[in-house]
Amino acid sequence: MNDPRPLPERMRPGTLDAVMGQEHLVGPDGSLRHALAAGHLRSMVFWGPPGTGKTTLAKLVAQQAGLPFFGLSAVTAGLKELRAAFAGATAESPVVIFLDEIHRFNKAQQDALLPVVEAGAVVLVGATTENPSFEINRALLSRVQVYVVKALEPDALAALVQRAQAQVYPDLSLEDATVESLVALADGDARRALHLLEAAAASAQAAGAQVIGPSHLEASLGAALRAFDRGGDVFYEQISALHKSVRGSDPDAAIYWFARMIDGGCDPLYVGRRLVRMASEDLGNADPRALAVAVDACAAFERLGSPEGELALAQAVLYLASAPKSNAAYVAYKAALKEVRRSGSKPVPMHLRNAPTGMMQSMGYGSDYRYDPDEPGGHATGQTYLPKGLHTSRFYHPRQSGLEWKIAERLSRLRGGGA
């Protein structure tokens, strides 16, 4: 008898080993796997894009712990449903409550979880697509472990699609080009990839075919796929071409690739988010206005919608492609992060510490600090701001491009002529 459940539900992993992707969580050295193996189960929140396995991980957590599992959605559930789920739960007989879209719970609803989570009667497993730092109140956030769930990499998506075909459609085979298109269109979303496979398989079966080809995927989706994948180009190739065209200061190529993606049905805000990234990564302080242009373009699209808002994104594409380039900010951040991870938590120098109390002042906090605006030229020459042992470190090296030419000139003067 055919299984009536949607393909994503049928392919839901039953063990941690069956989870595709998320190696940082469930791989041999994964943080979640280690936490579960240690038997120290605490409340947690899975934060990541749609279709990345947050619900699956929540169910596996409950399964591994051998505890009762209650699944709720913050979109439809309220305090009544929440309290009913943990009624009778105690620290000796705890329950796992999975709360999908937890960011949709207001402060009062989140506060209702605090006593039972604190007492150990409830192991809360939340899932959200929004940053928990902004959407979950601090009291609750301090009681949970946040796990970042990442969009699936192309290789993991391809393996998932091929596994589903072998298990559910053994009488059909998949062309490599179909797998490539499915992966590109899914954009890191496993649920979407499986829905696309299900539709393409139905199209192939209806046509009496033995191979699921690109034509069956096209037939199930319509003209949008043909426009998006015309000429054999895939999604990641097109966004790569757009990014490299902006970086290479070719506004004509950049606007072309932008138009290709929009015409093919790509989410305009996906491109907008990439433009924000480009503004910092590839332009940086050579033209600091670029970041505001990209952010404003995204805001304009959110306000106007499609198709009017796409013009603002097109304007941003042209601006970024035409502006001077520098990756100095990107390189500086990476270099500083590498040093932080290498040298650990060095103490803040005493003269840089704030001293709001008399006790802290008596301990030397803030002593010998020189207030730069009161110094000649507005700069306390010779005063250091890095931890001991890092005084001569240089992370930021401005390029001779755009505004950074002026920045480089000023920093060279302040550093006493050094680069």
Image: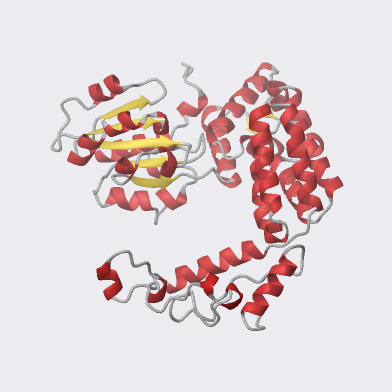
Answer above or below: position of 415 versus 166: below
Nearer-the-camera pick, 149 or 366:
366
Q: Quadrant of the C terminus?
A: bottom right
Left/right of residue 405 with respect to residue 365 in the rendered view: right
To which quarter of the image does residue 396 belong?
A: bottom right
Q: Position of residue 360 (x, y in %)?
A: 28, 70
Can see residue 294? yes
- Report the front residue among 323 and 378: 378
Q: Give the farthest residue toward the right.
A: 252
Viewer-closest of 173 and 16: 16
Q: Quadrant of residue 178?
A: top right
101 relative to 186 in the view: left or right: left
Name the residue located 74 percent from the left edge and 33 percent from the top edge: 310
Locate residue 251, reporting x and y percent. Answer: 83, 48
Q: Residue at x 51, y 65 (%)?
A: 337
* Residue toward you, 316 or 34: 316
Residue 267 visible somewhere in the drawing? no
**Percent from the top left, x then y, of residue 132?**
42, 42
**Residue visible at 41% across and 36% down?**
127
Residue 177, given in percent of the width and then of the height, sits at: 71, 38
Residue displayed at 57% across by 46% down: 153
Seen in the picture, residue 382 relative to 340 is either above or below; the reply is below
Report the coloring of the rendering: secondary structure
Q: Residue furthest left?
A: 92
